Image (cartoon, rainbow, N blue to C red):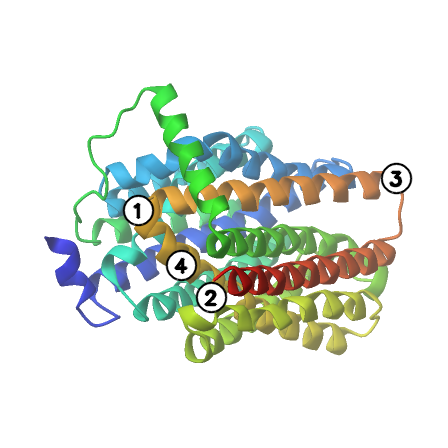
Amino acid sequence: MIQPLLAKSPLMSRSMTAVIVAQFLSAFGDNALLFAALALIKQQLYPDWSQPILQMAFVATYIILAPFVGQFADSFAKGRVMMFANILKLAGAAVICAGLNPFLGYTLVGIGAAAYSPAKYGILGEITEGEQLVKANGLMEASTIAAILLGSVAGGSLADWSILAALSVCVLAYAAAVVANWFIPKLTAARPGQSWKPKAITGTFFRACRILWNDGETRFSLVGTSLFWGAGVTLRFLLVLWVPVALGITDNKTPTLLNAMVAIGIVVGAAAAAKLITLKTVKRCLPAGVAIGIAVVVFALQTNMLNSYLLLVIMGILGGFFVVPLNALLQHRGKESVGAGNAIAVQNLGENTAMLLMLGLYSLVVMAGVPVVGIGIGFGVIFALAITALWVWQVMQKRRSLSSS
């Protein structure tokens, strides 16, 4: 078999290098495109509350396609699945670049992203094993966050100069990602020959949901990552409205620079998690999750640029330390029970449902006229309380398991 041979190779094998490069380029395109599209709808005079709708259309594709993309990732060589998904992203960016409806184009990018995610994370369990998996996730997150950093800044900065130039760069990034995907060796499909009848596919997916949600460890991972990414995407849109109010700056670039500070922090936090946390000590990440909410509250009250930058870096460090071990835990246990692709698809359903709910709530409070600083404070408090509840729940679960054994 090809996979065991690859799993015993050095961490930065040809397969891993190709995966990381492709992920960087694809994520760069995603983040540059978001801010270019936001600048476009701002130019076209859409109301403020419609900005999150752009992202909601994107994440809705994850939810709708969740029963299918895991099986898709496990039924074919994951490198080829990643390439197909990037071709869809390329098409969506081209639609926006051609002057067609930005919501339609970004939804097409979302379809590509939904297909891409189970393959990009699932392939890590096929080209690494054991404790290398945490390190591989650290590399994946570092690559993703570096792409968020550069892509966000490139999208916002170029959009201040020329929205068409910003959109064109996104098209080129996706095209380069397709080329990088071609260099991923063609691995054996994890679960070939599965039925493609809709009833069979949805049955398999919801069976995987039951298995993962009934397992205490994977349930912990699913809840934690869903809360994190739901909060993360909401914070991104909150910054767009917070910057003019708190700092008095109205350009497209400043919110992207602030997002970049979070990205820098996550790279550091992901590296720290890879060194300090193993699959056996995953729960060490929980204090960082609580601290994220506290940092958001402090940040919302800032009016000084330097303090804002520093707090966002700290938030990023805490975020990387929190989410990387949870991803590794889900991939490890999911691979053994339902297949890596199905596990990531279930995770995507949870994360994107959380994103959709949080973005919907955010749109409603903006539409209701709640001050943006108040939104930030409430957001931070709710997140800190949610992670605290998750922590208490895990402690109680452990006590129950010890008392029953």
The answer to which quarter of the image holds residue 129 is bottom left
The amino acid type found where label 2 is placed reads Pro
Residue at position x 72%, y 36% in the image: 50
Question: Who comes first in sequence, dot 3 or dot 1?
Answer: 1
13 up-or-down from 101: above or below: below
Marks 1 and 2, how far apart in space? 29 Å
Marks 4 and 2, how far apart in space? 20 Å
Residue under label 2, please give it. 325
The amino acid type found where label 1 is placed reads Val
Residue at position x 62%, y 44% in the image: 354
Marks 3 and 1, how far apart in space? 43 Å
Q: Position of residue 121 (x, y in %)?
A: 37, 53
Q: Which of 396 and 358 is in front in this view?
A: 396
What kind of element bears circle 3? loop
Q: In this rendering, which labeled residue sits more in front, label 3 or label 1?
A: 3
Residue under label 4, please give it. 24
**Residue farthest front in this picture:** 404
Mark 4 Cα within 10 Å, few/some/many (few <14, many 20+)? many
386 up-or-down from 357: above or below: below
Residue under label 1, please give it. 178
The answer to which quarter of the image holds residue 359 is top right
Question: From the viewer's perspective, is 403 left or right of 287?
Answer: left
Residue under label 3, please give it. 368
Marks 3 and 2, how far apart in space? 38 Å
Question: Who comes first in sequence, dot 1 or dot 4?
Answer: 4
Question: Who comes first in sequence, dot 4 or dot 3?
Answer: 4
Mark 3 Cα within 10 Å, few/some/many (few <14, many 20+)? few
Question: From the viewer's perspective, is 193 left or right of 256?
Answer: left
Q: Where is residue 394 in the image (x, y as percent from the top left)?
A: 59, 61
**Residue farthest left in this picture:** 1
What kind of element bears circle 1? helix
